[in-house]
Image (spheres, grey):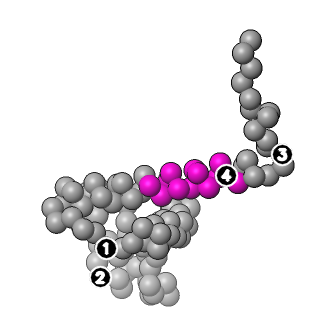
């Protein structure tokens, strides 16, 4: 479905690497045996980690019933996660001695 309907790359590592390509039975499995972009495959860990943190912080249950409102709810959770990260970074930045509020004070010139 990902390849045919969405025209996207499905990056899945081949399960049995020792089996030759000619003995593999599916068109998509043969494509995955021939190779995939390994840099893209390594990004999967980051995505899974972020989704795990979002679920842990904001809950894993979706209250909406309609698909459109479910998508909105998930989008708002992602926005909330980004805002959470940004506020934590700002607090961390101003709590260190290198950055002080006096350095960023605007003068009336």
Furthest residue in direction left, as rendered: 66
x, y (%) of residue 58?
42, 67
Q: Which of marks 3 and 1 is nearer the N terminus?
A: 1
Residue for badge 2: 25
Q: Which residue is drawn at 43% across and 52% down?
A: 79
Of tags 1 and 4, the one toward the viewer is 4
Of helix, strand and loop, which mostly describes the magenta segment? helix
Q: Is residue 82 magenta?
A: yes
Q: Distance between the residues labelled 1 and 4?
A: 29 Å
Residue for badge 3: 98
x, y (%) of residue 107?
74, 20
Instruction: Please give left or right for residue 79 compared with residue 69 in the image.
Output: right
- Residue closer to the observer: 41 or 86: 86
Question: Does dot 2 land on a helix, a strand or a loop?
Answer: loop
Residues drawn in magenta? 80-92
Q: Distance between the residues labelled 3 and 4?
A: 13 Å
x, y (%) of residue 62?
28, 69
Q: Residue 89 carries which label?
A: none
Say if mark 2 contacts mark 3, CB within 8 Å.
Answer: no
Say if mark 1 contacts mark 2, CB within 8 Å.
Answer: no
- Residue closer to the observer: 60 or 95: 95
């Amino acid at each position: 479905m990902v390849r045919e309907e969405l025209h996207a790359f499905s990056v899945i590592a081949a399960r049995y690497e020792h089996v030759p390509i000619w003995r593999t039975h599916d068109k998509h499995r043969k494509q995955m045996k021939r190779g995939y972009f390994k840099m893209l495959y390594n990004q999967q860990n980051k995505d899974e980690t972020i989704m795990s943190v979002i679920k842990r912080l904001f809950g894993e249950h979706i209250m909406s019933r309609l698909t459109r409102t479910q998508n909105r709810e998930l989008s708002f959770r992602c926005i909330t996660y980004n805002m959470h990260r940004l506020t934590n970074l700002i607090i961390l930045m101003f709590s260190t001695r290198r950055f002080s509020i006096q350095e960023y004070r605007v003068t009336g010139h």
